[in-house]
Image (spheres, coloured by chain):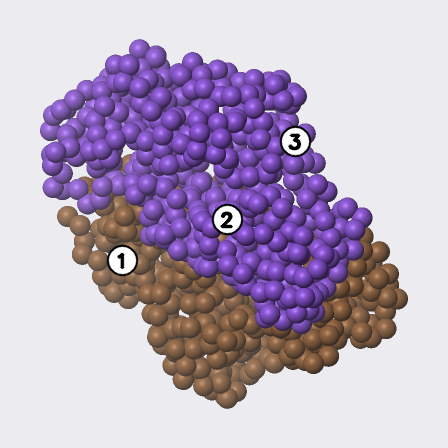
Chain colours: A purple, B brown
């Protein structure tokens, strides 16, 4: 490796001194995507080597709640048990709107069509789901109940694009322990199969043969470089780049405002896998997009309050998904965001997000003054809002009537939700551009032979914070991890 | 070339049958950046080959007004003649804010420090500038006057970050003919030197030698592939990707809303140069950013009107640069944008942008109803605006007092500035990540030997529509085109 200039540039196969190991499929990363890729590649009869940079399985999937976005096809058992006859079309329409202007129609179609089959596959691996429904608007529930609305399905404009249906499925575990539960199950399934697992194994560079084909990689194990050959393919499942501030600056600089300590992920979400793919001439897409949340509820009643910016203006229907709310908070010109409540709605907020009281007032004018908002600005906003709220509607932002009430009871209070002051967690959504099969494309949309990607190493189903729903990431990682494993496992071995 | 999978992937030097041509520096693209690179490389004593895909020089620079953003250093002649003693520090501070969260501090510092020297270089090539100042707010003036405010220097928040100073310099030509004027001068300068110019010459792929070094390229001329060796370097100056809707979708999908016919550029702004650089493991940055304009003025009085969105809310200080206005228009949740005027301000708009009357009213309530805005929304906005305007201030958005007047004279009218309905021109600002020297970086921030980029093939000084000023593109293209030419011309030839 002495003549290498950059780890990002693939090593030519001609420079490989000798193969230390040969396998059919190499999977990089042992989170949910990598585990599913390894399981499925093995199911195709392929020899699989699974490389993980840390000392155990899990990745960022283990840090999640493991809600999984599923439905369509007449409904999952939990949906049907609660009277939701979800259609594949409604699920597809929702996901297309959620994906924004660069939604991937082919991925969305496949995911929606096979969502019930994916549910069955997950349960066949050992996952269990109750069939109970949580009706109250919340972010993470701590019971072992299953189904809930985890996105903006009931919120404008999504509720006009597709019949609303809850599709977030939490596995049958108490507390916020879904991630470890999922990972334990997938890890056991991987171990049951002929998968050669290497922990503490750091990929240094890909190896490239004739015609741009990725034929293996160089991995650092026990302070030595090992040359590993992949006869059928390399599957990159090494996560996003939330933990790499240099990449955040280059690709998604709007998140710099949130602070590096707000990034969600494990320390290895440093974009290495994405950069390895780029070095192999893989194209990226939606690198400027990410999930960012303002988790201002529960209590669910807070959704009946209004969010205002530094101009005292509303800017979003407050009942949409907290990630969509966060996305629009970050779009405001200044960093100031307040949650305004009247006496009816006021209660103590959840402690973990760090919202503090920014001001109170017997009247809106008093509150406005205390918040140092421009004179008359908040008063005008509330006058307009209350005028329509009295009729149960919100013609400005289309808030769902079930969360509309006039803010006119007694005194007023505002919590400070300003950027930089409270907890706005974020992670990245951009990654390598792939086909639904997991095959990585270059910027001419040509397939790079032998290279696959899934999970946040790729740009998958969730593509913008404006349309994110909880359960999309694990749904995408498990489903498209499987597709990549199937594709690589069935690929024709190179000579 | 029969065994090539993708033109994006560089051809290994070992596959070159024979060099058809050898030179020191190859410059790709004969717009302003490429011309300046060729001139300076030649000045270093290098043999230069300049390849242009079309049949003549000019590129997109020829379509511009050729305003050039210059100042600092106590002022250019035009600045000093009009009493503007511009400081390098003020120019740097302005450019840093204009560059947004991913501003390039090294490029900004060099550009500001050498801006007066660059003015002198341009005049030494034959450009002439008057020393007259155009005080009225306009977009393009048709006289041969020189200096004007071409950005948001006088607008909040820029006016708080740096002492406002006009830095847009239009060359001494009548009409909107600055682009051809500039290109004629640069073309003559190129022709005076030992530069081998090839028109109708299409680059197919870069050629890569040992250690990732770019050693030449394959170019298609007269239906034949020719292998051209560059001993010192290849400089990519082949423009942005505004004309490539596939790339727009992948990298900057928000512009899809504007329609492909709104893209500004020449048909070869298809991102080829950027993709060639990516194939050579060059990293890109700010690919999601672009210039987008709502050229709603002149007449300058329209700036005293207010712009409102589908919620009847203001969202920007209307006196900032029209590109910043456009950027914020595109950020609104819906596509509806109106320019609201009172009787004092009403006049016929400029025809070319296609603004039509959307509604009128004897009262604000009538106008609101005619525009189908939510009841009371526009009324509340005007009540707040007029309340402060009567005191000459705009505490919501910080509009400059010289453009503030209460909208309370007689009847009201609104022009339709909605996205999709009127002319919102745009072009891209993202490109290859380079050092101020023009050297292209990979995603590990390592230099790719032998590869340089400038103009919109790189991500330069202008990095976001939120901070764009007219004159930044030609300023950047000419200045950093020169730097790339100097660097490549002085590079140590490879073996």
Q: How far apart are marks 1 and 3 (CA)?
A: 59 Å
Q: Is residue A237 above or below residue A194?
A: below
Q: Distance between the residues labelled 2 and 1?
A: 59 Å
Image mark 1: chain: B
One can see residue A425 in this view: yes
Q: Is mark 1 on a helix, strand or loop?
A: helix
Crowd class of label 1 (few under 14; some 14 to 19; many from 20; radius 10 Å): many
Q: Name the residue under label 2.
A: A350
Locate residue A221, reporting x and y percent: 15, 32
CB atoms of marks 3 and 2 within 8 Å:
no
Image mark 2: chain: A
Q: In this view, does B493 lie to the left or right of B73?
A: left
Report the front residue among A430 and A35.
A35
Locate residue A148, reporting x and y percent: 57, 31
Q: Mark 1 points at which residue?
A: B488
Locate residue A107, reporting x and y percent: 51, 27
Q: Is mark 3 on a helix, strand or loop?
A: loop
Locate residue B220, reporting x and y percent: 38, 40
Q: Quadrant of residue B24?
A: bottom left
* Label at residue A154: none
Ranked by sequence position, the earlier of labels 3 and 2 is 3
Report the front residue among B234 and A459.
A459
Q: Name the residue under label 3.
A: A164
Q: Pick the quarter of the image with the C terminus of chain A.
A: top left
Q: In which quarter of the image is residue A173?
A: top left
Q: Is residue A91 left or right of residue B186?
A: right
Residue depicted at x 21% and y 30%: A199
Residue depicted at x 57% and y 73%: B155
Q: In this view, does A16 lie to the left or right of A256?
A: left
Choose mark 1 or mark 3, whichever is in front: 3
Question: Are discs 3 and 2 located on one and the same chain?
Answer: yes
């Amino acid at each position: 490796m002495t003549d290498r200039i950059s780890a990002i540039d693939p090593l030519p196969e001609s420079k490989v001194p000798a193969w230390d190991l040969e396998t059919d499929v190499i999977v990089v990363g042992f989170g949910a995507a990598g585990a599913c890729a390894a399981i499925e590649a093995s199911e195709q009869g392929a020899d699989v080597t699974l490389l993980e940079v840390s000392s155990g399985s899990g990745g960022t999937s283990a840090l999640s709640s493991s809600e999984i976005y599923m439905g369509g096809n007449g409904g999952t058992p939990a949906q049907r048990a609660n009277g939701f006859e979800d259609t594949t079309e409604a699920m597809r329409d929702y996901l297309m709107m959620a994906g924004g202007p660069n939604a991937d129609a082919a991925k969305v179609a496949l995911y929606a069509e096979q969502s019930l089959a994916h549910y069955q596959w997950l349960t066949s691996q050992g996952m269990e789901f109750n069939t109970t429904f949580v009706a109250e608007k919340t972010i993470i529930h701590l019971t072992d109940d299953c189904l809930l609305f985890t996105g903006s399905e009931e919120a404008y404009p999504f509720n006009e694009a597709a019949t609303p249906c809850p599709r977030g499925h939490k596995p049958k575990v108490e507390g916020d322990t879904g991630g470890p539960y999922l990972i334990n199950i997938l890890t056991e399934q991987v171990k049951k199969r002929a998968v050669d697992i290497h922990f503490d194994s750091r990929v240094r560079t890909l190896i490239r043969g004739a015609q741009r084909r990725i034929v293996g990689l160089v991995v650092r194990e026990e302070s030595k470089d090992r040359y590993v050959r992949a006869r059928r393919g390399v599957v990159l499942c090494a996560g996003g780049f939330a933990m790499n501030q240099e990449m955040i600056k280059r690709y998604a600089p709007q998140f710099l405002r949130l602070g590096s300590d707000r990034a969600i992920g494990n320390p290895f979400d440093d974009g290495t896998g994405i950069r390895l793919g780029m070095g192999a001439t893989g194209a990226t897409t939606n690198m400027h997009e990410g999930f960012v949340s303002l988790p201002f509820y529960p209590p669910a009643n807070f959704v009946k309050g209004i969010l205002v910016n530094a101009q005292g203006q509303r800017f979003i229907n407050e009942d949409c998904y907290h990630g969509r709310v966060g996305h629009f908070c970050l779009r405001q010109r200044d960093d100031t965001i307040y949650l305004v409540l009247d006496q009816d709605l006021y209660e103590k907020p959840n402690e973990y997000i760090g919202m503090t009281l920014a001001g109170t007032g017997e009247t809106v004018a008093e509150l406005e003054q205390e918040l140092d908002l421009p004179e008359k600005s908040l008063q005008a906003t509330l006058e307009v809002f209350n005028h329509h709220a009295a009729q149960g509607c919100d013609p400005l932002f289309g808030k769902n009537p079930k969360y509309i009430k006039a803010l006119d009871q007694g005194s007023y209070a505002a919590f400070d939700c300003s950027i930089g002051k409270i907890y706005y967690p974020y992670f990245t959504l951009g990654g390598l551009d792939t086909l639904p099969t997991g095959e990585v494309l270059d910027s001419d949309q040509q397939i790079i032979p032998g290279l696959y990607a899934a999970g946040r190493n790729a740009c998958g189903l969730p593509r913008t914070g404006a349309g994110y729903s909880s359960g999309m990431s694990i749904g995408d990682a498990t489903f498209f991890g499987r597709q990549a494993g199937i594709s690589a496992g069935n690929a024709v071995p190179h000579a």
